[in-house]
Amino acid sequence: MNNLAFLGNLGTGEIIIIAIIVLLLFGGKKIPELMKGIGKGVKNFKDGVKGLEDDIKLDDTEKK
């Protein structure tokens, strides 16, 4: 079964109903802005994690 961890046991019908409710609450014009903000947040998070990994690798090479 191909379930996403954060969705739990939601089926296709439930996801469609949630999408419709979100569309009704925020409207069609706000959703792209919300997705853009989420995308920027995810990108910043990935950049931060990559920076930490680079710092850790740099520290490891300095210790050797």
Image (spheres, rainbow, N blue to C red):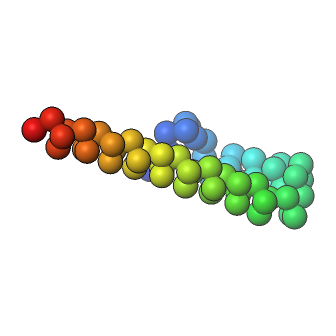
Quarter of the image with the C terminus is: top left
Tell whether 2 sits left or right of 62: right
Residue 38: x and y in percent read: 66, 52
- Observer-nearest of 59 and 10: 59
Up/down of 60 relative to 15, above or below: above
Instruction: Examine the image and state in which quarter residue 49 appears.
Output: top left
- Observer-nearest of 31 and 3: 31
Q: In the image, what residue occupies the spot 18% across and 40% down?
A: 62
Up/down of 49 relative to 63, above or below: below
Instruction: Examine the image and state in which quarter residue 59 appears.
Output: top left
Q: In the image, what residue occupies the spot 87% across and 64% down?
A: 29
Tell whether 38 sits left or right of 29: left
Residue that lies at the very extreme toward the front in this rendered image: 62
Residue 32: x and y in percent read: 77, 63
Answer whether residue 32 is visible to the viewer in this image. Answer: yes
Tell whether 4 sits left or right of 12: left
Answer whether residue 1 is visible to the viewer in this image. Answer: no
Instruction: Examine the image and state in which quarter residue 52 appears.
Output: top left
Q: In the image, what residue occupies the spot 62% across and 50% down?
A: 41
Residue 54: x and y in percent read: 32, 48
Residue 30: x and y in percent read: 85, 58
Q: In the image, what residue occupies the spot 25% across and 44% down?
A: 57
- Number of numbered labels in the structure image: 0
Tell whether 34 sits left or right of 50: right
